């Protein structure tokens, strides 16, 4: 399913099975998660999309050929980070997530809304066996980006999650398993979302206009709504951090300096490193995370994107060829 022009529906194109180049694996797709970033790509909110492009960067599949790292038949995950230069100051400084020339799966590189794709084997991840294909897919971005955001909260005891979708529903379980107190903020009056958050282990859930039961040590924002940064700052204690986990957000309105005063910080989290991937998959192997998925046949990708856009999903949408 490919995007030919921004803001148009994806079209079902028939292509030849790609051939793996040097260092690449040919992967038969078993499941591919639908991420909010796919919406930003499809809606034309990210620059430089080389149309036509196949979206999808939460790819679970089986290696059919190519490369040396994985035997044919191995199950692998293909995440957002698809290639880095290895030479820039960020790559040399263990921050390849910020690589000046990074290429991303389903954005610059062909993604997993397909039956096959090729990928650089160095960026593929081994997946914990305990998760079936569809349940493993959301780990590859929602889980991973949530995890990178979570690592930025250091030893915060009370964590607020703004926007309770695919990322937050995985992270709430992990944070709770590690003894944190988790408060979940949804859209106003989203009672279904609030029930879902409690079901996933949140200690409290409410609308983003409601005060939490106690002030936050850290907040993570997954919803693409800039005004939430201010709501989160006001609910965060001195010295606390507000982490923005999305790739795109509406503008942050101006706010009084007093809301930031007290050594509060606002940070963004961009992409992931291969080390994040390996660490998170190890955790996911040890902690049984329940990923709630709604599966769609691959050809229904447009319906899955529409459901995500309209907020009709609990958990994550996953396409299966
Ligand atoms: Zn680089
Ligand atoms: Zn994503």
Image (tube, rainbow, N blue to C red):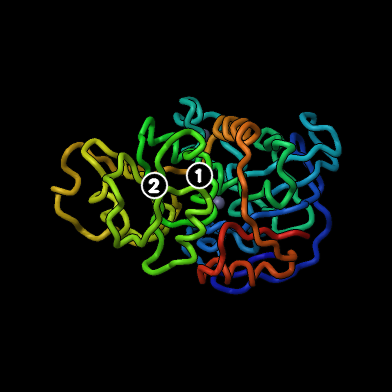
Q: Quadrant of residue 307?
A: bottom right
Asked if disc 1 and disc 2 are in contact, CB closer than 8 Å, the reply is yes
Give percent across and percent down for residue 310: 51, 71
Left or right of residue 286, residue 89 in this image = left
Q: Mark 2 points at which residue?
A: 220
The vertical placement of 125 against 35, above or below, is above
Q: What residue appears at the point 43 percent right and 53 percent down from the top-left corner?
A: 222
> Which quadrant of the rendered structure holds the C terminus?
bottom right
The x and y percentages for residue 265 are 27, 40
Question: Which residue is at a point 29% across and 62% down the rendered structure image?
Answer: 209
- Looking at the image, which is closer to me, 276 or 294? 294
Who comes first in sequence, dot 1 or dot 2? 1
**Circle number at residue 171:** 1
The location of residue 283, given as percent across then percent down, is 59, 32
Taking the spot 46% from the left edge, 31% from the top edge, the residue there is 90
Q: How crowded is mark 2: few (under 14 residues within 10 Å), some or many (20 or more)?
A: many
């Amino acid at each position: 399913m490919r995007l030919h022009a921004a803001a148009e529906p994806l079209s079902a194109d028939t292509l030849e099975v790609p051939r793996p180049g040097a260092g690449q694996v040919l992967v038969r797709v078993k499941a591919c998660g639908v991420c909010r970033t796919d919406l930003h790509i499809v809606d034309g909110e990210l620059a430089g999309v080389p149309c036509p492009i196949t979206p999808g960067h939460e790819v679970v599949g089986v290696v059919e050929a190519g490369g040396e790292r994985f035997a044919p038949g191995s199950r692998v995950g293909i995440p957002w980070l698809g290639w880095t230069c290895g030479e820039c100051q960020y790559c040399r400084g263990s921050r390849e997530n910020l690589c000046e020339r990074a290429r991303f799966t389903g954005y610059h590189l062909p993604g997993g809304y397909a039956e096959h794709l090729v990928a650089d084997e160095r960026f593929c991840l081994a997946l914990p066996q305990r998760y079936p294909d569809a349940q493993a897919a959301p780990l590859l971005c929602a889980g991973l980006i949530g995890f990178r955001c979570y690592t930025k909260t250091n030893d915060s005891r009370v964590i607020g999650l703004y926007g309770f979708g695919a990322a937050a529903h995985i992270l709430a379980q992990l944070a709770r398993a590690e003894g944190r107190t988790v408060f979940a903020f949804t859209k106003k009056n989203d009672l279904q979302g609030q029930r879902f958050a409690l079901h996933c282990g949140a200690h409290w859930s409410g609308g983003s206009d409601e005060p939490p039961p106690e002030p936050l040590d850290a907040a993570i924002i997954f919803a693409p709504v800039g005004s939430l940064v201010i709501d989160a700052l006001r609910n965060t204690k001195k010295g606390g951090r507000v982490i923005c986990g999305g790739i795109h957000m509406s503008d942050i309105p101006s706010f009084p300096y007093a809301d930031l005063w007290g050594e509060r910080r606002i940070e963004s989290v961009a992409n992931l490193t291969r080390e994040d991937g390996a660490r998170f998959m190890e955790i996911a192997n040890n902690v049984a995370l329940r990923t709630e998925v709604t599966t769609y046949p691959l050809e229904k990708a447009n319906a899955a994107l529409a459901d995500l856009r309209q907020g009709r999903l609990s958990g994550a949408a996953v396409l299966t060829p």
